Amino acid sequence: MTISEKVAYLKGLAEGLDLDTTKSKEGKLISVMIGILEELAMSVEDLEENALNLGEEIDVLSDDLADVESEVFDEDDDLEDYDDDWFEVECPTCGTDIVVDDEALAEGEVECPSCGTRYAMELTDEDEREEAEEDEEE
């Protein structure tokens, strides 16, 4: 039973008592109190409806924020597959080991410290690399 229904029930009980609300002090008091209760019940219902609407809007905003966070904070997902902050590759020109770190990956190229040759770095996973090698063999 809602608050409005309870107040309506109380109002019906008061009317059933046939209280004189014009001459009797008690009748006037009860009539005014029931009027105030009716107003409070309507206000509470409005507040509950507003809270429900706000909750729905917050859910929508939360979903939108989650989308923004995934775009902003998940942009480096392709780098998360590597356990170390760096790895080494062999220079095809001179055979020296070249250290490749996150900065070199971000720049997209690396320079051999011995011979000075610059190489483009492309980050791919093992499956893509194997498919590329198979395509080259065909």
Image: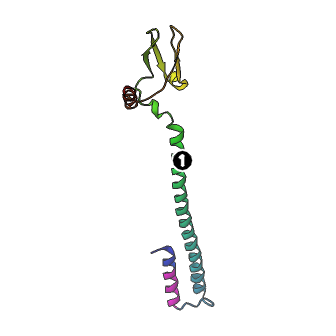
Residue at the limit of the structure toward the front, as seen here: 138
Within the magenta stretch, is there residue 74? no
Determine which residue is flagged by label 1: 65
Q: Position of residue 126 (x, y in %)?
A: 38, 29
- Disc 1 is placed on an element classified as helix
Q: Residue furthest right?
A: 22
Q: Position of residue 69 (x, y in %)?
A: 52, 42
Q: Is residue 9 above or below residue 100?
A: below
Task: Point out the image quarter for the C terminus.
Answer: top left
Q: Is residue 105 above or below residue 57?
A: above
Tell me the quarter of the image containing the N terminus: bottom left
For the stretch drawn in magenta, what is the main secondary structure? helix
**Location of residue 5 in the rendering, given as x and y in whole percent from the top left corner:** 49, 78
Task: Tell me the crowding category of disc 1: few under 14, some 14 to 19, or many 20 or more residues within 10 angstroms, Cα based.
Answer: few
Residue 57 pos. (x, y %) = 55, 57
- Is 12 inside the magenta-drawn segment? yes
Residue for point 57% across, 77% down = 38
Q: Eyeballing the image, is 99 above or below 70?
A: above
Residue at horizontal 53 percent and vertical 66 percent from the top: 48
Q: Amino acid at mark 1?
A: Leu
Residue 29 or 39: which is nearer the viewer? 39
The residue closer to the viewer here, 106 or 51, is 106
Q: Nearer the viewer, residue 19 or 110?
A: 110
Count of numbered circles in the view: 1
Range of residues picked out in magenta: 8-17
| Residue at horizontal 50 percent and vertical 42 percent from the top | 70
> Left or right of 43: which side holds 122?
left
